[in-house]
Amino acid sequence: MMRHAIRQLWLGMLALFIVMAIGRFAYTPILPFMQVSEHMDSAQAGFLATINYLGYLIGAIIPMYFIFKSKAIDLKIYLIINIMATILMGVTESYGLWSMLRLVSGITSGTVFVLASNIVLEALRQAQKSNISGLLYSGVGLGIFTSSIYIFFETHNDSWQLTWIVLGVVSLLGGMFVIFGMRDNPTIKIDQTQHAKIEDRQPLNAKFIRYFSIAYFCEGAGYIITGTFLVAIVKSIPELADYAALSWMFVGLGAIPSTVMWSVIAEKIGYDKATYCAFVLQIIGVSLPILSNHTLILMISSILFGSTFLGLTTLFMSTGQKLMYQSGGKSNLVASLTVIYSVGQMVAPAISGVLIGASNNYNIALAFATLVLIIGLFSTMKSYKVLN
């Protein structure tokens, strides 16, 4: 079981590297080049992000109601489609086709995220290694870091299409390991005594789930504004424009250790206090660019943002998986939370695009994100107060 669980973990990390770091988040550092080359304004850019997150919402719902063959086989199918959508982003200049491709990319990102989370977290639980579950999401940070370095050195206003193609081809090569290596988890036989204990487990606390869901919705809505426009914000500062893509590299640098770091912190001080701390640091990171455009401030902002947005995903997903198991697995809380999260991140970019408007002033959007995250923090505190 241990060997199987570790293999599932590494392949799950690779799958999220592909569909999240590249298929989904590479849009952020490439966006400024697309905007200049194709004369795309902030509202249009925000809509492309929104259509992607609409797809993510749809994708998160699909595994809750429909498994075509099995979790592992379905993951591989969606992974291939996601990679093709990434490559095709580089072979067209049609805004309409971009919208369709970002929708497809979002759908497949959502399905792969839910399926990979379920497969890997289940395998780790079976092997009694849930304490290393945070490693799963570190693949996203690693992908953000490496892809942003490539984009910084190789992408220009006239070469953004090649960047999409190269990233897609790299994804295809990596995806082969997932396609040929990932397997469904074995079914663990449960004796009658264990089965009876599962049947006696209490359902999830509805009041806790309500506040917990509001909190994760706010996290999805609050983080994604910076997640969509961070590089564009730096690009809009003349003296920093040439180094805009590096801001996303610092996000990745902060994100790589964050999932493991927050898992360790949660084990030491509790998941409730760890979540509060992560929210506070993210609020600081998101709001700092409002106060100053100094290079050091933006660097700190990027690192704080990177070290918390995946960390919060890890904390919420781990708590959801734990509660789902304790309730007998009668509800797919991981998928439900992902749906709620994706609703938040679908709505926020469109609102932000309107708030930014033609003025290219991002402060109002960042202030809006800060407010939403503060609401998320208080909702989290309320949810754990109910649980305890």
Image (cartoon, rainbow, N blue to C red):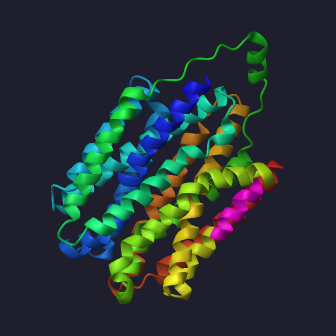
Q: Specify the segment rendered in magenta.
A: 272-281
From the image, give the main secondary structure of the stretch colored magenta: helix
Looking at the image, residue 101 lies above or below residue 324: below
In-front residue for pair 374/79: 79
Q: In this rendering, would 323 be left or right of 29?
A: right
Where residue 362 appears, x then y in whole percent?
44, 81
- Residue drawn where x is 65% and y is 26% of the image: 126
Where residue 343 appears, x then y in whole percent?
49, 55
- Residue drawn where x is 29% and y is 52% of the image: 167
305 falls in the magenta region: no
Looking at the image, residue 253 lies above or below residue 157: above
Where residue 326 appears, x then y in whole percent?
73, 33
Where residue 173 appears, x then y in whole percent?
30, 40
Examine the rendering and report whether any part of residue 92 can be seen.
yes
* Residue 274 placement: quadrant: bottom right
Looking at the image, residue 35 lies above or below residue 10: below
